[in-house]
Image: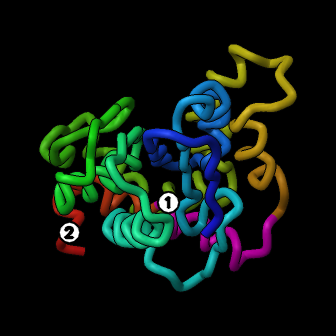
Amino acid sequence: MHYVDEGQGPVLLFVHGTPDQSFGFRHLIKALRVEHRCVSIDHLGFGLSDKPVNSDYTVAAHARRLQGSIDHLGLIDITLVVTDFGGGIGLQHALEHPANVKGIVLYNTWLWDLMTDKRFRWPSVIMNSWFGRFLYLQLGFSVNVMMLPPMARNPGSQETPMRTTRRPCQMRLPARQRSLVYNRSRTLVRSGTHSGNASTG
């Protein structure tokens, strides 16, 4: 898996969600690497990491791979910075290794089962339908619609994670690749809505 590791000092581990990658943290890393060791990993299937078709893309599987990267890089006394699905992925380390977590920064994420809230339950129903498949495979819905407002706020920028993320959705991908994108997204939605149970996956 691809990762960014810059700077020296106390460890900040940035854990991204979907659709995103370590590139989304580039400005934070640039500002904080002067006094911190800033690490951000592209989850399997995202950013510059490999994208194997038959891999497990559940939140629990991402959490296990993140733990492997933490062990491999020897990260200790970590401050976790988690967003979106990265909450369910990164907080598993805090639950299993609390002594290794110095601090936690949460934004745009959740700490409970969302399926009990009807405002969040309907996206899961849509994602598991033929219509959800159409939205992801044919329209690139998450990056072309859901992520459009940040692009609109900064239309002149040439270097944004939105441009990087959106580019593949503007190409006609082979059917197998389109299916991979859809299945990965659907799997994250299914498992992410129960991120509190990540250790059971």
* Secondary structure under the numbered disc 2 in the rendered image: helix
Q: Residue furthest bottom?
A: 54
Q: For the magenta stretch, what is the residue range?
A: 173-185
> What colouring method underlies this structural image?
rainbow
Residue 150 lies left or right of residue 108; in this view the side is: right
Q: Quadrant of the N terminus?
A: bottom right
Task: Examine the rendering and report whether any part of residue 118 can be seen.
Answer: yes
**Residue assigned mark 1:** 185
Q: Is residue 201 shown above or below 26?
A: below
Q: Is residue 172 shown above or below 81?
A: below
Q: Residue furthest top?
A: 153
Task: Examine the rendering and report whether any part of residue 187 can be seen.
Answer: no
Give residue 178's quadrant in the image.
bottom right
Q: Nearer the viewer, mark 1 or mark 2?
A: 2
Q: Position of residue 197 (x, y in %)?
A: 17, 62
- Which mark is drawn over residue 66? none
Q: Position of residue 50 (x, y in %)?
A: 66, 73
Q: Position of residue 119 (x, y in %)?
A: 26, 34
| Residue 174 is inside the magenta segment | yes
Mark 2: which amino acid? Ser
**Residue assigned mark 2:** 199
